[in-house]
């Protein structure tokens, strides 16, 4: 109990809470390793773990350059159900600026990636369509000329002439290469979208003895140095501070 009181007091120092968050929770639990919050490294990522009142939450955070990606797992060893609602999760940046980085729906992220890919494919196809192949044809003409005059004289001779013509046709090799590149990009996007969708943490009601886990994405604005990942669960608000070296 003394540790929990310490953690609640520490949470107020780490991150200001919005009115909505205060209204949804009654206990603020901050991850402080000197007071019960542990950690372990997994594939180079530091995973922070809080276990309190029959709930265990583990979290790691990665800056992908476009988004913040959190890997979150929740285990229920209590005697009651509680809801895991990723859309209610958020990140509070504390340095260099104070700002809230909102949750990003994975379906919208995939749709946005598909739109960007469609535009890229359109430009690739248009570029290949404008490429032309030119071929040059040389034609040689020759013959004999006879000239007769009224005084009975005549003359004859031969001539030779060369003409050059240039024709332009679509570059079918460039079009085939563009189509192959488009198919390859579409296949890669399909695989990546499937992987992201399957790994995403969905809304779940977690019953006693069960656990859920997955990826949650958040906005990225600038280069944050210090952030706090906020995970509301039932009547508790779990906070995980992370630092980034810039």
Image (cartoon, rainbow, N blue to C red):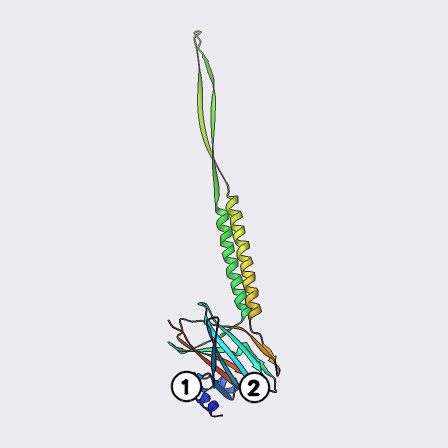
Question: Which residue corresponds to the image point at 47% horizontal and 17% vertical from the top-left?
Answer: 144
Q: Residue furthest bottom?
A: 2
Residue 231 at x, y = what percent? 51, 80
Compared with 209, 106 (above or below) is: above
**Which residue is label 1 attached to?**
13
Q: Residue at x 50, y 84 (%)?
A: 237
Label 2 vs 1, first from the N-terminus: 1
Above or below for 64 versus 126 = below
Q: Residue 189: x and y, percent?
A: 54, 61
- Image location (x, y in percent) of residue 147: 45, 13
Q: Which residue occupies the foreground of this view, 48 or 152?
A: 48
Identify whether 229 is placed above or below 22.
above
At x 50%, y 46%, the residue is 174
Please, what secondary structure does the residue beneath circle 2 have? loop
Foreground pick, 118 / 210: 210
Q: Residues within 10 Å of mark 1 (few under 14, many from 20)?
A: few
Instruction: Please tell me the numbered disc located at residue 54.
Output: 2
Residue 74 in which image quadrant: bottom right
Q: Residue furthest top?
A: 152
Q: Please state if 227 lies on the left or on the right of 192 as rendered.
A: left
Please indicate, yes or no, whether residue 20 appears anywhere in the rendered image. no
State left or right for residue 158 relative to residue 188: left
Say which mark, if any, is on residue 190.
Answer: none
């Amino acid at each position: 109990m003394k540790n929990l009181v310490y953690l609640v007091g520490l949470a107020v120092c780490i991150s200001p809470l919005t009115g909505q968050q205060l209204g949804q929770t009654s206990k603020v639990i901050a991850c402080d390793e000197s007071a019960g919050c542990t950690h372990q490294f997994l594939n180079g990522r530091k995973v922070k773990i809080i276990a309190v009142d029959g709930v265990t939450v583990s979290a790691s955070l990665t800056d992908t350059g476009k988004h913040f990606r959190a890997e979150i797992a929740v285990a229920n060893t209590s005697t009651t159900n509680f809801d895991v609602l990723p859309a209610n999760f958020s990140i509070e940046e504390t340095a260099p600026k104070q700002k809230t980085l909102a949750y990003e729906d994975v379906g919208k992220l995939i749709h946005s990636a598909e739109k960007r890919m469609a535009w890229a494919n359109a430009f690739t196809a248009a570029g290949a369509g404008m490429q032309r192949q030119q071929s040059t044809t040389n034609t040689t003409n020759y013959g004999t000329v006879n000239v007769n005059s009224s005084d009975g004289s005549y003359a004859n001779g031969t001539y030779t002439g060369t003409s050059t013509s240039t024709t332009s046709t679509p570059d079918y090799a460039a079009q085939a290469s563009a189509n192959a590149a488009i198919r390859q990009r579409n296949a890669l996007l399909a695989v990546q979208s499937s992987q992201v969708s399957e790994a995403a943490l969905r809304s779940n009601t977690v019953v006693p003895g069960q656990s859920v886990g997955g990826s949650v994405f958040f906005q990225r604005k600038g280069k944050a140095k210090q952030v706090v990942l906020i995970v509301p669960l039932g009547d508790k608000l779990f906070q995980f501070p992370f630092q980034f070296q810039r």
